Image (cartoon, helix red, strand yellow):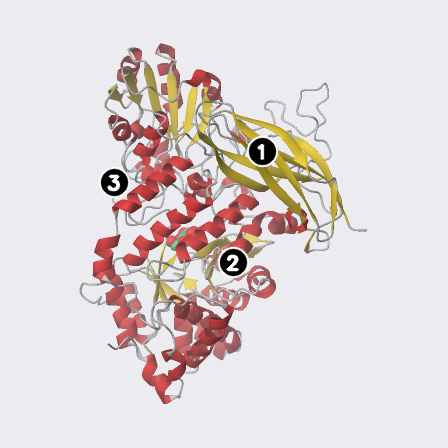
Amino acid sequence: MKYNKISPYIAATGLLVVLACSSPKKSFVTENNRDAIDKKVDSVLALMTLEEKVGQMNQYNGFWEVTGPVPKDGAAALKYEHLKKGWVGSMLNVKGVKDVKALQKIAVEETRLGIPVIFGYDVIHGYKTISPIPLAEAASWDMEAIKKSAEIAAAEAAASGLNWTFAPMVDVSRDARWGRVMEGAGEDPYLNSQIAVARVKGFQGDFGEFNVAACVKHFAGYSFAESGRDYNTVDISNNTLHNIVLPPFKAALEAGALTFMNSFNELEGIPATGNPYLQREILKGQWNFKGFVVSDWGSLGEMVSHGYAKDLKEAAERAANAGSDMDMESYGYVAHLTALVREGKVSEDKIDDAVRRILRVKFTLGLFDNPYKYCDETREQQTIGKKEFQDGVLDMAKKSIVLLKNDNNLLPLKKEGLKIAVIGALANDKTSPLGSWRIGADDGTAVSVLEGLQNYKGNRISYAKGADVAIGQTVFASETHINTTDKSGFTEAISTAKGADVVIMVLGEHGLQTGEGRSRASLDLPGVQQELLEEVYKVNSNIVLVLNNGRPLTIPWAAQHIPAIVEGWQLGTQSGNAIAQVLYGDYNPSGKLPMSFPKSVGQLPLYYNHKSTGRPGNGQPTESVFWSHYIDEQNAPLYPFGYGLSYSKFEYSNFKISASSFGKGGNITVSVDVKNISNVDGKEVVQLYIRDLVGSVTRPVKELKGFELTEIKAGQTKTVTFTINEKTIEFYTANNKWEAEPGDFKVYVGTNSDTRTELPFSYITN
Ligand code: BGC
């Protein structure tokens, strides 16, 4: 079978042997085979014209009914022509073996060199079988489960022809107004880093046929958009960049991520796409990244709107020189890069470097060995939607749920004899749980909460919608839907609630009210849902509030009045089953919040690992106003980072430290006993925080430095031990490097970031 046309060229140049020794199935990158890949890459590069090189740096969006007739005119016709000339290195948003194969065939069989195209897609939390949104998964603190979830997504995506996912997003997010907090792992760099590693490993595996390349995004600083408004200006210090923003990117790189995506925002006045400090100096320089950087969608062209380039040509020049290797949908490289090289504005060395990186990834994925590696229709049919994947996402969904409140053990519910009223549009919604990125999943394919509850036959369930959360397509009309004022369903909801033993109210945000471009200025329950909640409460206060949302919400009234609150996010295809199993106690919740829940939107940005300030106060009201606080709100969050309850009760005791100090190369251990004092088996995430009391630059009041998710049987005690060494305490210091500074510290353990259980220790270097 003729896979591509490189081989004859290579045979002619005597390099056939190099290609022939590559194995068709595996191309796992080790230091040893990296050299071999680099030789192959050079052999291909040597054959390429400048136009073909620039072509590799060009990525197009899917553009016409691929398997249908050839486009005759317009942009599609141009893209089609470019593909045939070998001027398209990558495509996005094409999926399904039939379509991918049709395009790959053109690249491989109709272009001069037959270099395969790499196909990317936003497989963020599942492909057809949808997992919880990433923020929800982060709440599991379960790295194995998160890795498994990424494996499922990769297997389905790869079976449908895709080679590359634009995930994980590792942007540390402190501002819940920003709609994309749903796509990351929350506010903490350490947790984000662990999860980045799990996701990269899950997606990429050993680059077999069920794996896809990962793309770590958005490099860098995107989540710090001022006032939480997507795409807005970012203005953060170098200190924040290095200590907070960059660590998860570095962790993902060290886990072997093949590609990075830059971002829409500026940093120090320079858009990330044209930013040499980020891409050349840090990523490719200090970190020695060997893969390639793709721009974000149109971000190269947007440098004109930023006021950083006078036109698309200058934007292309700046992006290429700054180390942005592939242009996603700006058409800047394909239109201008060849001329820019000929005019001496971009060196051919830089082009060669970018192309080498892109080809390296294609070789690593095995696309040169077999460009149709991902194009097996039988595998596609047998893989997508497999039963075991449904089980996998159900498991992930249960682990993602966070129990926020459970007064008088209202939960779990009895399985028999109850009259249950279920209220809320989201309770009966089979699309919203699919979240903001749903790719191959069809609308209406999630299990709704109502369906999940109806699987338990022992109780009598009645349902009333009460109020809409969002109707229909909210992508382009979010404002009108989110602010719906229709209360016509209240009467029915109130009468349904009246005679019930328990009312389950499913309220929150529709899956399309979060995500890219969906920033919010208010974090209250959208529309009239808060009013609905209060009206129902008047007739029946025995309410379990199940939240469905993609970001922390401001629910102080509910936190005060409603006896039980369950954070049910947007949990994917198996959402309703997961929620029902938690409500009925068939799964004992163990999730912990990956983001602080504010009391009011005015507290944002809100995060536990803040600095002390010069006037920290003690959190209590005083006579004086001259300390860092609000006169109309407390500083503390409603629910802190790391918070979450269980049907079990855990008691912490016997907190010990092995020594009061350690020196260079040394370490100390801390341990704590955690007893399950209830009669229910459960899981607890034991968390370790430190505080560096004095630094060459100011340090956060607390930083997560370790955690252990541990199963503790009823009545059992477990001792959990953590090691503290130089790695634990190092940070980006005033010397502009990562190092451990001698001094005094505090270490804390506990069930959430608000723990006060502390011990002192020191790091001594002389
Ligand atoms: C988003 C990226 C995404 C890309 C491709 C952009 O708008 O910011 O995260 O990968 O589109 O869909």
Q: Is residue 522 visible?
A: no
Residue that carries the numbered disc 3 in the rendered image: 445
Residue flagged by tag 1: what amino acid is it? Ser
In terms of depth relative to the viewer, which is nearer, 482 or 758? 758
SS category of the residue bearing label 2: helix
Q: Amino acid at mark 3?
A: Thr
Relative to residue 66, is residue 24 depicted above or below?
Answer: below
Q: Nearer the viewer, mark 2 or mark 3?
A: 2
What's the distance in space between the residues labelled 3 and 1, CA to CA?
37 Å
Q: Secondary structure at mark 1?
A: loop
When the figure is inspected, residue 652 is found, relative to residue 216, above or below; the finding is: above
Q: Kindly identify which residue carries mark 2.
A: 253
Q: Is residue 381 above or below residue 700?
A: below
Occupied quadrant, residue 96? bottom left
Q: CA distance from mark 2 to mark 1?
A: 28 Å
Q: Quadrant of residue 409?
A: top left
Residue occupying the point 69% across, 35% down: 612
Quickly name the residue at label 1.
753
Q: Which of the two labelled residues, at mark 2 and mark 3, occupies the earlier sequence position? A: 2
State the residue in front, 317 or 651.
Answer: 651
Q: Position of residue 562 (x, y in %)?
A: 43, 18
Work out whether mark 3 precedes mark 1 in sequence or the reverse, and give the earlier one.
3
Q: Are marks 2 and 3 in contact (CB under 8 Å)?
A: no
- Near mark 3 (Cα within 10 A), the count class, few <14, some 14-19 or many ≥20, is some
